[in-house]
Amino acid sequence: MTVKSSSMGYPRIGENREWKKLLEHFWGGDLSEETFHREAKQLRLSYLRKQQEKGIDLIPVGDFSLYDHVLDTAVMFGIVPTRFDYDGGRVSLHTYFDIARGTKGASASEMTKWYNTNYHYIVPELNDCKPLLVQNRPLEFYREAKQELGIEGKPVLLGPISFVLLSKGYEPEQTREVIHKFLPLYEQVFKELENEGVRWIQIDEPALVTTVSDEVRSLYKEVYEVLHQSAPNLHVLLQTYFESVTHYDDVIQLPVQGIGFDFVHDRGENLKAIKEKGFPLDKVLAAGVVDGRNVWRSNLDQKIDVLSELTNEIELDRLIVQPSSSLLHVPVTLKNENKIPDVLLNALSFADEKLQEVVLLAMGVKEGKEAIRQEISSSVYAVQQLNQSSYRNDDVAQESSQSSEDIKRKAPFHVRYELQKKSLEIPFLPTTTIGSFPQTKEVRKQRLQWRKNEISDKAYRSYIEKEIEKWIRIQEEIGLDVLVHGEFERTDMVEFFGEKLNGFQFTKFGWVQSYGSRCVKPPLIYGEVSFEKPMTVRETVYAQSLTNKRVKGMLTGPITIVNWSFVRDDRTKAETANQIAVALRAEVEALEQNRIRIIQMDEPALREGLPLKKELQQQYLDQAVYAFKLATSSVENETQIHTHMCYSEFEEIIESIKALDADVISIETSRSHGELIKAFEDSTYEQGIGLGVYDIHSPRVPNQTEMIRSIDRALQVLPENLFWINPDCGLKTRRPAETIEALKVMVSAAKQTRKRFLVHE
Ligand code: GLN
Ligand code: ZN
């Protein structure tokens, strides 16, 4: 055996999103189940073949999914919430999709972020389940690869500790008990794989990089001891990623044959631990050196150096070279990108290119740099060229990334509050919305035609203006207090700004899976970000010109832009966020100069960027608060800054939310009202705040009693003179009729509530 190359997981979506199309055809009823399965299999095999052709030694099998790998794990154990059709045995394809997508009568399982990525998994509901192994998925996919392609695959399976920690439906103190319920099933999977003659299985345990309780920590040993006993001849590669392992000493002693580390997103900690504490002689070390989460080409020279440091600790034939994580998080291939400038294109690497890098590195570490000299120099050259290009050398913008002055609003909140109340004529219990109004088929059609140059700028603009006008009138009629222009000119809240700021590049096919068949195309922040010209002034001012009510300007915040993009890796995210903040500040000021006195800067992605380790979280939050303030603090006291967030797990971050010093914050609430109210019981919030009074994710129009109930519940913990009444989130996915109806109910609920207060006073 010698240095091996490996892949930990490959994108599911296909070069042209074939996978997405296949799923959507099937859901749309255009395909029989048989055809669907046949085509899915063709895709799956083509991905394996591709990895084989690239020369990857250990090819993952079972990482492919028809929706989500956490859901796959749940259904192989027969975990199906009782509201869905299921009476034991293998879970049918229809039930599988029902859990993920919901049915008329049963809501879908919750979905949430996969660690600190933008991939969402389906949260298994374990409530009193009696798990049973109803499908040995890893074995099936192992057999398929072997029969069809002669590939000795490496089955990938989510490990029991991470699986249970990612699930819900039990109390934290039951964790051990619940893991032990699943353990026999994992044993059975392992035994069957061993009998089949499988050599390596990759067990993903990303939980090992997070902060866990001592109880969970003590489970590592227990669990892996049991699994080892059950199949002593199966080689277990315990795989971690997204950070450094939290308890290195514990982890290296586990009875497994190999351990996988992330050497890209570990802040140098994994390598340091290995150098300081050594690595066991009897284990294989899988080295994730090629960034599995970002799109930059590896500097092969530096990567070989890292690998060489490892080979000081272990023998060559116990080293595996691989990406830092599954390649699920990066686009498939650069091959079809023909609009990206060369200097940037040469410095990029998507999944297919990354696998090539892995293979080269395996060869380079085995035979020495000389063996891949040419490839090393071209990679070093490409990275250097980009770094030295004018894109990355703009002094003014560079300075903005280093911003560190103490920034704050001119006066504290209570002073601003009085000034704003007067000059903006904000009524008691004001009503507003979060920004977007329905993006109808027609809106999207117009935009597409404009993008394809089928209609002129002028025609498109006048269409957008007509929509704005229509919705200004609608809002006036409904009787909302603070109006919005509706965001009809935006497809996506990050893309819109990325296309107008300097330093961003958009790809043609750079899709990554977000959840289910839903893919996103994150922009690449590759250069110095700077403000070029006003981005939102035209539409906002136009909307304001139509009405005597106040129109709120709508911007996306720096942290959300950073978290939903691929960012430069030659500087910190915080520096990039500051640079974006300075550019956005120019927009805020432009709006203000144009007499827009209410400006909202959305930060829906603030919380999801929270580091996986507790001890790193405060620094992240402080930097996020800094960037937000950098973007919003230069305005006059009379200008009201709003922000919006789409989640409500606030307890841990409430101090940072306060520190943003926004005049008004709106928060999504409906899906977890109780918990949120509790957060505000435990901690007082004394600036303007709107807790969403109805859920916009459903077409259902709630009645007035329900809305009044949510308002009343919020008013038990929040002062009424600071309270705003708004929906949970933007309305772009809703239909016009239901939007109008729901907002009417909302406004009348607000009026009712106002009356009650005035009577009492
Ligand atoms: N202003 C945006 C909208 O209304 C906010 C979207 C979001 O929070 N994700 O669509
Ligand atoms: Zn939202």
Image (tube, rainbow, N blue to C red):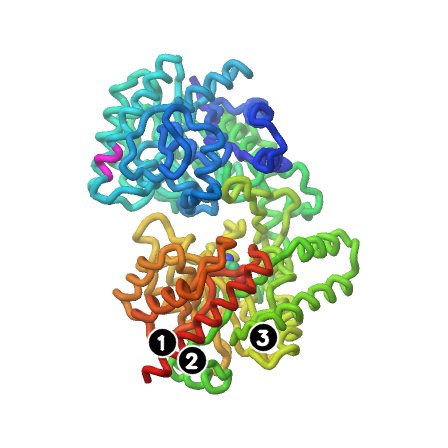
Please name the residue that numbered disc 3 is placed on: 476
Q: Nearer the viewer, mark 3 or mark 1?
A: 3
Please name the residue that numbered disc 2 is placed on: 428
Indicate left or right for 251 with 348 as reference: left
Indicate left or right for 90 with 569 as reference: left
Q: Position of residue 730 (x, y in %)?
A: 52, 61
Q: Nearer the viewer, residue 88 or 730?
A: 88
Q: Position of residue 179 (x, y in %)?
A: 26, 33
Q: Position of residue 35 (x, y in %)?
A: 60, 25
Q: Earlier in the sequence, mark 3 or mark 1?
A: 3
Tag 1: amino acid: Glu
Q: Is residue 80 visible?
A: yes
Q: Gap in Å between the C-alphas at discs 2 and 1?
A: 8 Å
Q: Is residue 453 magenta?
A: no
Asked if the residue at tag 1 contacts the one at tag 3, i.e. Cβ–Cβ closer than 8 Å, the answer is no
Q: Gap in Å between the C-alphas at discs 3 and 1?
A: 24 Å
Q: Residues within 10 Å of mark 2 (few under 14, many from 20)?
A: some
- The magenta region covers 175-179
Q: Position of residue 582 (x, y in %)?
A: 53, 67
The picture quadrant where one finds residue 693 is bottom left
Q: Gap in Å between the C-alphas at discs 3 and 2?
A: 17 Å
Q: Nearer the viewer, residue 463 or 351?
A: 463
Indicate left or right for 499 with 216 as reference: right
From the viewer's perspective, is residue 657 above or below residue 97? below
User: Is label 3 in a helix, a strand or a loop?
Assistant: helix
From the viewer's perspective, is residue 30 above or below residue 295? above
Q: Earlier in the sequence, mark 2 or mark 1?
A: 2
Asked if the residue at tag 1 contacts the one at tag 2, i.e. Cβ–Cβ closer than 8 Å, the answer is yes
Please name the residue that numbered disc 1 is placed on: 720
Helix, strand or loop: magenta stretch: helix
**The N terminus - image quarter:** top left
Q: Earlier in the sequence, mark 3 or mark 2?
A: 2
